[in-house]
Amino acid sequence: MIDHLVLASPDPLATRSWLAEATGVELGAGGPHVGLGTTNWLGTLEGGPSGGTYLELIGPDPDQPEPEAARPFGIDDLAEARLVTWCSRQPGLVALRSRLAGVLEMTEPSPMQREAPAGLLSWELAFPLDDQGGVVPFFIDWLDSPHPSTVVTPGLSLASFALVHPDPERMAEVLAAIGEGVPVEAGDEPGIRARLTGPAGSIDL
């Protein structure tokens, strides 16, 4: 199940304004990822292929000191906002890792927390060792936390979502093993394509 799309930006406030001007929807504040040097803004994506999908805009948090390690999603190396990856919602990441052995190498699940306006959220993440340029998703289990799509800003719709890869057949097989049926198109470079629509218009990411 597609959980969310990740839009990373070196200047998230400027990107948030750009999205609002293009779509008419201003993403709501998520909260800081303490120790990672990042914070995020969120918006529900109606019309997602599996429902309960949202957009995460993530970038540097000016209220945190510079982190010891690089920020996630290549944020420190970005010159402009880019859709960098997507997340698949999967219950039981330990079991998923075992089930995908031989198909996809992934990290052990790691616990995460974030203080949100609605309270403390706790979840687990696991990442593929090779995400094929963002085509292979990372994984999340929200445990007992409420899903962000139920409480964040509404108004955006996911008009289209597709993946691009030089070997679309192989990527489709990997995604099928995960349980995701996202279309994979042939292209010279791996990547992600999405069109978002709002009351003021559409935007391609």
Image (cartoon, rainbow, N blue to C red):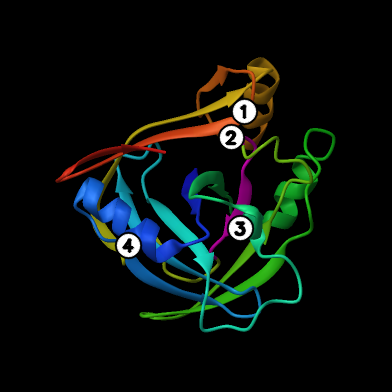
Which residue: 69% across, 76% down?
Answer: 67
Tell me if mark 1 has few (under 14), some (14-19) or many (20+) residues whose alpha carbon lies within 10 angstroms of its own. Answer: few
Cα separation between marks 2 and 3: 28 Å
Secondary structure under the numbered disc 1 in the rendered image: helix
Residue 147 visible here: no
* Of marks 2 and 3, the one in the foreground: 3
Q: Quadrant of residue 176?
A: top right
Q: Are marks 1 and 2 in contact (CB under 8 Å)?
A: yes
In 3D space, how far apart are the residues under numbered discs 2 and 4 (Cα atoms)? Answer: 23 Å
N-terminal of the pair, mark 4 or mark 3, is 3
Magenta-highlighted residues: 135-142
Residue at mark 2 = 179
Residue drawn at the location 62% of the way across and 43% of the way down: 137
Where is residue 26? Give x, y as percent: 26, 60
Disc 4 marks a residue whose amino acid type is: Thr
Q: Is residue 71 left or right of residue 193?
A: right
* Residue 173 counted in the magenta span: no
Identify residue for label 3: 75
Disc sitting over residue 176 in the figure: 1
The disc, 1 or 4, on the residue closer to the chain's N-terminal end is: 4
Q: Amino acid at mark 1?
A: Ala
Q: On the picture, is 39 further left or further right than 104?
A: left
Task: Tell me residue 165's x, y (percent).
Answer: 63, 23
Residue occupying image coordinates x 40% and y 40%: 50
